Image (tube, coloured by chain):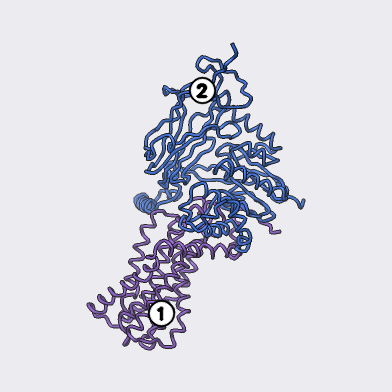
Chain colours: A purple, B blue
Amino acid sequence: MARIIIEAGRAERHYWLDLWRFRELFYVLAWRDILVRYKQTIIGVAWAIVRPLLTMVVFTVIFGKLAKLPSDGAAPYAILVYAAMLPWQFFANSLTEASNSLLDNEKLISKVYFPRLIVPASSVITSFVDFLISSVILFGVMAWYQYWPSLRILTIPFFIAIAFCAAMGAGLWLTALNVKYRDFRYIVPFVVQFGLYVSPVGFSSSVVPEQYRLLYSLNPMVSVIDGFRWAILGNDSQIYLPGFFLSLGVVVLLLIYGVLYFRKTEKSFADII
Amino acid sequence: MSDTVIKIDGLSKSYLIGHQRREKYLALRDVLAEKAKSVGKRLLHPLRGASVGLISGDEFEEFWALDDVSFEVKQGERVGIIGRNGAGKSTLLKMLSRITEPTRGRIEIDGRVASLLEVGTGFHPELTGRENVFLNGAILGMSRVEIKRKFDEIVDFAEVEKFLDTPVKRYSSGMYVRLAFAVAAHLEPEILVVDEVLAVGDAQFQKKCLGKMEEVSHQGRTILFVSHNMSYVSELCDRGILLNQGRLELDAPIDDAIDHYLNRLKAVNMPTYKATGDGSGSPYIESAWISYGDGEPLQEARTGDSVGFSFKVGNPRKGLSFNFSICDMMGHKVSNFNTLNTCERDLVIPGENFVCTIEELMLSEGTYLVNMALVEGGALIDHKTNAMVFDVCAASLRGRKIGNSNYGTSILMHHSWKLPS
């Protein structure tokens, strides 16, 4: 028979074991979020397609045609944008969904015990499903331009993993802040919007002047987006390695900090929510 | 020693209660404003000490919701936890189900625990009955295989076969509760922790649930049951733990514990109720009081008196309905008064007091309790059990003298006898 001991600070020590024990709940919550998302409207699915597609068109016209920013090599500008739009949307959706997830599941948290990490994590999974749906469009766009990827495309799972870490780290951090400071939710949309412009979504990061490149790479999404482009655009895209590793380091730090901060705040969730 | 399944030792939980702020969470803007202020102060008066706490000017008071409670529960025991509102029952259950951590003390539990603090936790209105069974089952700690195995049994128990593939948002509140309880009733933990979930649903279904719980307990499982309904507690439990203001007052066979509790309850006359909201902006029952028909505060009602029940709802909004029940000492509902039934359908609960007047109080002598509930579209927004207590003494009704022996019944009716002349 399993013996459970409850005392102050105890749950702390068995956290990761508990997370494993509650894995089934994790699947079920993710399944629920996905089901609800795509059940409510057919627009649910359409939304995952229309949003990045329209943004891609607008960015291609503004940055590519009007501002005449250079693409990477010979790659069509639309593909350059869409290759970045994919991970960016995933990241942005994760932040938005995760940061509200605990408040949306307030009832659950005040009535049942489980490692709270499950809730924002399942929001990230839901955003990932959106990401997969939007990815299909990428192939459509590439076929339209008759642009074929090289073998580098096989490395894409690695960059998806980085995107996952970035989304999870930032997501957890914002989630905890959102529970602690109830007015924080007004800041999240701003952060997301701001991020879109400081990340190389509408333009190639090669347009950033050489001397600022390293500084620019402090943005964790730089490694993710550059990685995606490197994998999708094949030989047309060159990666700036020092920047990539710096940005990757930031992602790792963000993930560690996000988890730690979430864990620190988590204990009091049921009391303050 | 091996048959002790729950061992609670010196369990305490404290909360900090702010006096000035009503919200329990922080707003970033307040914290930033305070930080800026204290930086400003420090610049102006560099020699003075910095203020303590996140937000200065706020006094926090430590409140012990549970204070040094210890007891043990043996396997197969059915323990009823009773006490007034705020006695610490919910806090105890929350700690047993690991929702909050104790401040001090420790709990040792041997075996799988399932806690039912609410029926239908995690039910999603957009999902179908079938999907919600799986969802709710997982939340309560059942594995998928287990749910699959019991699925038919659950559906059978809830009597909702026909609506399995309908989103639960289209369910009547009765169906919803039945399905929710059915999932819970099929949990097979070694230890079952139940909060007043039986308070919902119709009487017939309540009986069914109670029967199911008794069946569970006969299989050698341990039950911890919290309820305000003394007849359920006495029917289901064999041992009672009475909590009072966070302390364990009595640990005795159930009937003794109930007697003790009822005697305490009789000694109080509590014709008013007051609460502060949680600051989240959602509606709540702010205050309630009982008065004589002419508005004077109630001391002791007499049978046949005109009595007014006044209520005030905080943060009211459209679509709310309000109801209250008068219950006897055992927690049996004697009568219910609902704005949905007696007022116009779209009654907008106002921000001011509203009054329900009972022209003639047709209750026999005794002590009565008032339960209140604020409902929105079938969902319980706020509710309080035993929020008020009032006494009724026998008097005369329309000129007829009412005796004080009513063979344990509480409702009186106008009647006349015809005798052969």
Quarter placement of the N terminus of chain A: bottom right
Name the spot of residue A36 as percent of width and height, x first.
45, 61
Locate residue B40 relative to residue A67 in the image: left or right. right
Q: Position of residue B168 (x, y in %)?
A: 48, 54
Q: Nearer the viewer, mark 2 or mark 1?
A: 2
Q: Amino acid at mark 2?
A: Ala
Residue A223 seen by the camera = yes
Label 1 element class: helix
Where is residue B277 drawn, in percent x and y?
A: 44, 42
Q: Alpha-carbon distance for marks 2 and 1? A: 77 Å
Q: Position of residue A173 (x, y in %)?
A: 45, 63
Residue B199 higher or lower than A17, as above or below: above
| Chain for disc number 2 | B
Residue at (43% x, 68% y) in the render: A127
| Above or below: residue B362 compared with residue A60 | above
Q: Residue furthest left?
A: A66
Element at label 2: strand
Q: Residue furthest front?
A: B421
Q: Against B110, is B264 above or below? A: above
- The residue labelled by disc 2 is B301
- The residue under label 1 is which amino acid type? Phe
**Which of the two residues, B316 or B178, is positioned nearer the viewer here?**
B178
Left or right of A250, for residue B81: right
Which chain is indicated by disc 1?
Answer: A
Mark 1 crowd level (few <14, some 14–19, many ≥20, 10 Å Cα): many
Q: Which numbered disc covers residue B232?
A: none
Kindly identify which residue carries mark 1. Answer: A228
